[in-house]
Amino acid sequence: MSGDPTIEGTEATLSTNNYLALNEDEIPTGAIESFPGITPNKTFTLGPEKPDVDHCFITNTNPSSAPIDTRQLPLQTLGTFYHPKSKIHLEIQSTEPAFQFYTGKHIDVPAVDGLSARGPRAGFAVEPSRYINAVNNDKWRGMVLLKKGQKYGSRNLYRGWRD
């Protein structure tokens, strides 16, 4: 968002800090917990190494109420981002009940055709989704199991602008 080699200095605001806790193998345990260091709707700054995030955040903590087709639900803001150097804003909205937020720790892109290499924290991602591993959890399976005659769908909106 800044044109710099890393995301450092980007101001982030997430709509939730509820996330799927992981075990030592990084598989969701089934528990929804509060992510340490992130307060819903409170801005925090992405630094050179922290926060280190690669987790599924939950906007709807009642998985049984998440229909297979969410297109008729109202859009909800998942996150907003701003970089003071570039004055660029990014807002992500979705009807999905969750989203993956990743701060780029494992980015390793070599230089190609005159383009610079990109390393750790060269970017971040916000990916609207269903609960990670939902198909393997009886309480969550209904949000991803498509039955004959059903339609799967969602709406996502990405807005970007500069001051």
Image (spheres, rainbow, N blue to C red):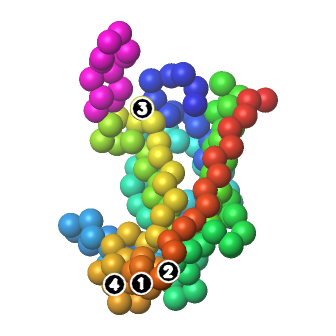
Q: What's the residue type where badge 2 is placed?
A: Gln
Residue at the top extreme of this rendering: 114
Residue 21, position as x, y percentages in the image? 38, 72
As helix, strand or loop, the secondary structure at mark 1 comes to loop
Q: Which residue is mark 2?
A: 150
As helix, strand or loop, the secondary structure at mark 2 comes to loop
Circles 2 and 1: CB atoms closer than 8 Å:
yes
> What's the distance in space between the residues labelled 1 and 4, CA to CA?
17 Å
In terms of image quadrants, where is residue 163?
A: top right
> What's the distance in space between the residues labelled 1 and 3, CA to CA?
40 Å
User: Which mark is in front, 3 or 2?
Assistant: 2
Question: In the displayed structure, would residue 2 be above or below residue 92?
Answer: above
> What's the distance in space between the residues labelled 3 and 4, CA to CA?
34 Å
Q: Which residue is mark 1?
A: 147
Q: Residue at x 61, y 56 (%)?
A: 156
Q: Residue at x 39, y 42 (%)?
A: 104
In terms of image quadrants, where is residue 148?
A: bottom left
Q: What's the residue type where badge 4 is placed?
A: Asn
Q: What's the residue type where badge 1 is placed?
A: Lys
Q: Which residue is mark 3?
A: 122
Residue 19, position as x, y percentages in the image? 47, 70
